[in-house]
């Protein structure tokens, strides 16, 4: 599962509990060189020490809602590396009022923003990564099984994640002839900063642990191990999948 001589972009680290950080550590442990992003100046002091601990050679701001920041990130990668082997997209957002209310009551603006940040930004990154993956590569994003089943309090993000998973399949079909593989990682409930906005999340964690076949919750390290394998050449025949990393919770009725 070596990633020696591979270069990857990790988008979405907020702190050391982030899924993206668990993946970044696994990528680095397998030998990859990493470019890492932070959301804004407020987030930078939390992310910079983590990037330095991973010997990251590129650290840049990336707010997908800010004009030109995504493009600037890929321009720097093009200039300094001239190639890219994998991308991990681990960002999602919905306005609090829309996220914590009923889907039927969500605003047009809130739904559009959630789709832009959580789904369309992955498509944008795929388009920018494509010319850098001349010898193939791997694009990964992060989803949740609330996309296919109704999870109480997940609300508007369910349809948004469903759109993200469908995008994974279409991107895999369109980019497959170029050797570019596309996956969605689907961890079970994890206590991350992003999850803190979901109502009654503690109850969801407890229920998942009680009902999963392995009677446990996945960790960011578990997610990272799967992400590193998918980015490796050993996974070259896998694409278009939703990879569940949830101790089997998704199979339970």
Image (cartoon, rainbow, N blue to C red):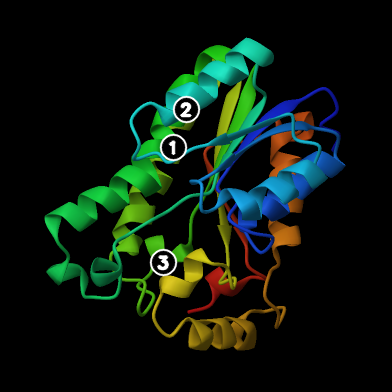
Dot 1: element: helix
Q: Is residue 159 above or below residue 171?
A: below
Q: Is residue 53 above or below residue 161?
A: above
C-alpha gap between disc 1 and disc 3: 19 Å
The residue drawn where x is 52% and y is 26% is 73
The residue indicated by pointer 3 is 146
Tell me if residue 168 can be seen.
yes
Q: Nearer the viewer, residue 21 or 164?
A: 21
Instruction: Tell which tag, 2 or 3, sits nearer the viewer.
Output: 2
The residue drawn where x is 68% and y is 46% is 48
The residue indicated by pointer 1 is 122
Coordinates of residue 199 in the picture (x, y in percent): 39, 81
Are discs 1 and 2 less than 8 Å apart at CB?
A: yes
Residue 39 horizontal side relative to residue 134, left or right: left
Are discs 2 and 3 less than 8 Å apart at CB?
A: no
Few, some or many residues within 10 Å of mark 1 (<14, 14–19, 20+): many
Q: Is residue 128 above or below residue 201?
A: above
Dot 3: element: helix
Coordinates of residue 158 in the picture (x, y in percent): 34, 63
C-alpha gap between disc 1 and disc 2: 6 Å
Coordinates of residue 124 in the picture (x, y in percent): 40, 29
The residue indicated by pointer 2 is 126
Coordinates of residue 52 in the picture (x, y in percent): 77, 42
Give the mark count.
3
Q: Nearer the viewer, residue 44 or 223?
A: 44
Residue 40 horizontal side relative to residue 93, left or right: right
Of the residues under marks 1 and 3, which one precedes in the sequence?
1
Of the residues under marks 2 and 3, which one precedes in the sequence?
2
Image mark for residue 60: none
């Amino acid at each position: 599962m070596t990633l020696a001589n591979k270069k990857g972009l990790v988008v979405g680290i907020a702190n050391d509990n982030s899924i993206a950080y668990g993946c970044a550590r696994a990528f680095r442990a397998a030998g990859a060189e990493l470019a890492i992003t932070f959301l804004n100046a407020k987030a930078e002091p939390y992310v910079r020490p983590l990037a330095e601990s991973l010997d990251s050679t590129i650290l840049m701001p990336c707010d997908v809602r800010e004009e030109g920041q995504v493009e600037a990130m890929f321009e720097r990668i093009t200039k300094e590396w001239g190639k890219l082997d994998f991308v991990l997209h681990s960002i999602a957002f919905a306005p609090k009022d829309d996220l914590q209310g009923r889907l039927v009551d969500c605003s047009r603006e809130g739904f559009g923003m959630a789709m832009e940040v959580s789904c369309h930004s992955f498509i944008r990154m795929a388009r920018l990564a494509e010319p850098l993956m001349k010898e193939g590569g791997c694009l990964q994003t992060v989803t949740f099984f609330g996309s296919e089943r109704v999870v109480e309090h997940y609300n508007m993000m369910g349809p948004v994640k469903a759109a993200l998973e469908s995008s994974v399949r279409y991107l895999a079909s369109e980019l497959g002839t170029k050797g570019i593989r596309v996956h969605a990682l689907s961890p079970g409930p994890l206590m991350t900063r992003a999850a803190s906005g979901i109502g009654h999340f503690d109850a969801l964690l407890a229920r998942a642990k009680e009902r999963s076949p392995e009677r446990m919750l996945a960790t960011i390290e578990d997610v990272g191990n799967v992400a590193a394998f998918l980015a490796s050449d050993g996974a070259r025949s896998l694409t278009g999948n939703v990879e569940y990393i949830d101790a089997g919770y998704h199979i339970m009725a």
